[in-house]
Image (cartoon, rainbow, N blue to C red):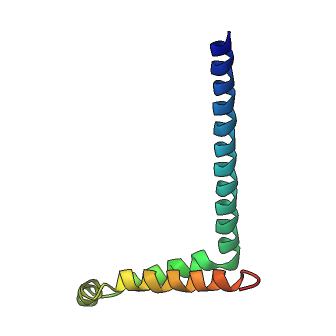
Amino acid sequence: MISDFASWLKAIIEQVIAWLVNLLLAIFSWFIDAAIYLLDLMGITQRVKIASHYFDALPDGVWYFMNLFQVQWGLGLVMTSYLIRFLIRRIPGL
């Protein structure tokens, strides 16, 4: 009798935890969709397409030296640090 109750309670708790995890994933997905929509409204996607067109026009010699000096990694690092700096400045009280 007690083991049946324990297994029932365990099943209920597992269902509640699964529901909460799915809820958090859905909320995260909604935020991602909203961010993509806002970026699209601001015209960021069009600017990225234009930038990719300019990068496609670079000759192979330039790409060689960009890869040699790890420019791709460096640009990602700089952009990430600017994003973190922007977000930290938005936190009140800091």
Residue 4 is situated, as x and y percent measured from the top left of the image, at 65, 13
The residue furthest right is: 92
Residue 10: image quadrant is: top right
Which residue is at a point 58% across and 75% down the rendered structure image?
45
* Left or right of 91 in this view: 48: left
Is 65 on the left or on the right of 37, as rendered?
left
Asked whether 49 or 19 is in front, the reply is: 19
Which of the 4 image quarters holds residue 92? bottom right
Seen at 65% across and 79% down, the residue is 43
Q: Residue 4 versus residue 70: which sits nearer the camera? A: 4
Asked whether residue 24 is in view, the answer is yes
Q: Position of residue 29 (x, y in %)?
A: 64, 55
For image coordinates 65% across by 43% down, the residue present is 22
Task: Give the residue furthest to the front.
Answer: 2
Give the residue at the far top of this rendering. Answer: 1
Q: Is residue 50 visible?
A: no
Q: Which one is nearer the viewer's eye here, 37 or 90?
A: 90
Residue at left 33%, top 87%? 58
* Residue 1: quadrant of the picture: top right
Which corner quadrant holds the C terminus? bottom right
Tell me how many marks there are: 0
Counting from the top left corner in percent of width and height, residue 11 is at 64, 25
Front in this rendered view, residue 12 or 25 = 12
For residue 8, side relative to residue 51 (left or right): right
